Structure formats: structure tokens, C-alpha cells
Image: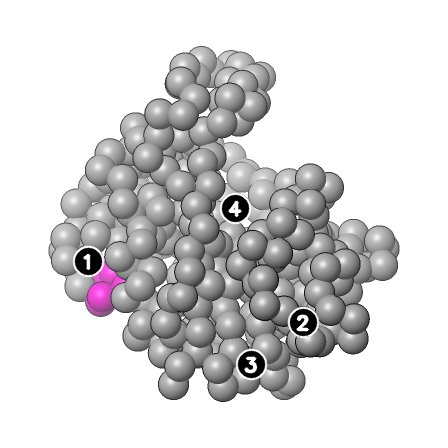
Amino acid sequence: MRLEHVNCPCCGDGATTAWAAEAGYSLVRCNTCRLLYVNPRPSMEDISAANKLGEHRTEEGTLVVRAHRDEKLVANFRQLIAELFPELSVPVRWLDVGAGYGELVQAAQTILPAGSTVLGIEPMSAKTRHAQAAGINVVDVPLEEIRDQYDVVSLINVFSHIPDFHEFGAGLRRVLRPGGTLLLQTGNAADLEARDDYPDELYLPDHLVFAGETQMHRILGDLGFRIERASYQRLDSLAFVVRSAVKHLLRGKLLLQMPGRSPFRIVTYRATLID
């Protein structure tokens, strides 16, 4: 593994405190802005290659993150779009970045006003092929090659995979029309005091950066976005805790946790491009 030491991706400072360790990687907290990030992290070349393959090298072997298509997400995304975009009544152009198997693209296609166009872009070829076989409009095109502008850009559980969101966010600005909307979903892990408050594995180094609400307001503000609304969802439901326990038992590990105890939340932000 080729590792490189980096300063905080949020504020640029270098002083940190150890927060967690997993699979041979360290997750540190920035002493200045309190962002959590992997340091040292894989090289940019290795990050790019891993994102295309869905595989990461760790001290414990290969971490495979291709997962699978989740039909339940389609209904969840329909509900989320209806909740956060109640005013939509005219056709819109929507770009989903990091579209995975196309669940949000499919949901948007069925709930947006007639005449809307929805495109998903995804670097992992296995996911792109699966979505295209199902007739879902997901393509293997990087953000920097997108030339059109959109009314809405969505980024669902992608933030933590991006090593430099300031640079990536400039690309989001470029493909959004003035006054356009960014829909961004990620966790609030940096709001947690201790690793024990996080109700799941960290999946390092697939996840490189963990923000909280303060850091998201700062990062998006630096990029010229204003957060208009936020929606919150628990992760540690009874069903999730049971699935996690079974998954760990299959790996020969014992995991004991109580549902509904963690302060961790999945947060979905609706933000407007203001400058």
C-alpha cells in the first residue's frame, strides 16, 4: 500500500488527535475544525483505481465495496425527493453523481414532473453495467467530462469517499446552473465524541473523510452554497442492529449494541448555489 500524509481536507491544518483505527488505517480528528479523516491515506492513484474496481487493499486483506442493488432504496428516495422538493411542478434537469446501481435515478424518473431528464454518473463499471442492463440512465463518465448544466445535482453517500471536496465541489458548481440545488447526503460522524458512538464499521479506507454539521456548513459555504434544509435519519434501528450482529457472527466476531442509542445520524442537506 502506498500511503501519503495529508493535512485536514477541511481547514488545511496538520495537528490531529487519534480517533479510531481499522484494517491498518488510522482515522484522526483535526484539532482545529474537528473533521475526521484517514491519515495517512492511500495515494490518489490508488484511491481512483479502488473506486473503479470497488476493492481496497487493507492489512486484513481486500475490502470489497461493490455491495448490491437495493430495491428498498428506490421507495426511500421517492419519499426523500417528495419531502425536500415539495415545490417541483415544472420539468427539471437532474444529475446524480456517484449513482451506484441507479436507485435514486430510478426514483427521480418516476416522481419528477413529466419532461424532466435524469442522468447518473458512476465510476464503478460493475454498477454502471448493472444499471444499464435494467434500463436506468447511468453512465461511466467522470464529473469533469460533463458539459451540460443541471437544475439539481445529488450526491448521496459519496462525500466520505472524496479525498478533496473543495476541488470536487468546484466541479459540482460548474455543472449547476446559477441558483441550482445541491442534494447531499452523508453522516454526522464528526459530531460524535468517541468511536463507540458510531454504530457501524468505518470501512476504511473506502471512507476517507467523516464530517459533522459544522464542517458541512463550512465546506459548502466555502464553495458558495447556502444550506436551506436538512433531514435526519437514524441508522441504529432494530433491524440494522440485528443485521450487523449476524454479519459479524458470520465473520467470527461478536458485536453487542442496543438499538436507538447512538447519536449518529444520516443527514441529507438541500443547499442552493448562491454565488
- Mark 4: give few (<14), some (14-19) or many (20+) Cα within 10 Å: many
Please identify the quarter of the rendering in which residue 59 is found: top left
By secondary structure, the bulk of the magenta-drawn segment is best described as loop
The residue carrying mark 2 is 89
- Callout 4 touching callout 1 (CB < 8 Å): no
Residue in view at x 30 percent, y 75 percent: 222
Which badge, 3 or 4, comes first in the chain's sequence? 4
Q: Nearer the viewer, mark 1 or mark 2?
A: 2
Residue in view at x 77 percent, y 58 percent: 110
The residue carrying mark 3 is 175
Q: CA distance from mark 1 to mark 2?
A: 40 Å
Q: Is 83 in front, or is 130? A: 83
The residue carrying mark 1 is 33
- Callout 1 touching callout 2 (CB < 8 Å): no
Q: CA distance from mark 3 to mark 4?
A: 29 Å
Which badge, 3 or 1, comes first in the chain's sequence? 1
